[in-house]
Amino acid sequence: MATMITEECINCGVCEPECPNEAISEGEDTFIIDPKLCTECVGFHETEQCAAVCPVDCCVPDPNNLETEELLFERAKQIHPDKADGLTLSSETSRFRAAS
């Protein structure tokens, strides 16, 4: 599932540079996340970096974009073919493993 930014966004912009896929951009009223580019940081970090740095906790899972860790990992490799060999799945503390 892609991460989304809720209307509580205060437009601070702290999330944008944290995204390894450049999926976050400034929208009309709030920052937005392109679900076609969002991999929830799978392959790069154990947790979504936008959510980790958000001061108002408005970066949340998008219930309309449910995806598996494997699909997100494959997307990360497609987005970053030059880094594909260096990408790794998250550790056992990943929310994907915690849900199992």
Image (cartoon, helix red, strand yellow):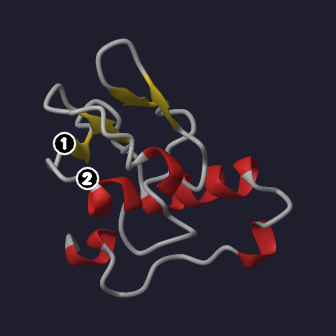
The residue that mark 1 highlights is 58
User: Position of 99 compared to 94: left or right?
Assistant: left
User: What residue is drawn where x is 21% and y is 33%?
Assistant: 10
User: What residue is drawn where x is 61% and y is 48%?
Assistant: 21
Q: Decide: is 59 above or below 41.
A: above
The residue that mark 2 highlights is 54
Image coords of residue 64 (percent x, y): 28, 30
Q: Decide: is 49 above or below 19.
A: below
- Farthest residue in the front direction? 12
Image coords of residue 82 (percent x, y): 86, 61
Q: Decide: is 3 above or below 99.
A: above
* Distance Cα–Cα, label 1 vs label 2: 7 Å
User: What residue is drawn where x is 20% and y is 70%?
Assistant: 99
Residue type at mark 2 is Cys
Badge 1: how crowded within 10 Å, few (<14), some, or many (20+)? some
* Label 1 residue SS: loop
Image coords of residue 94 (percent x, y): 33, 76
* Label 2 residue SS: loop
Q: Mark 1 touching mark 2, by CB under 8 A? A: yes
Determine which quarter of the picture holds residue 95: bottom left
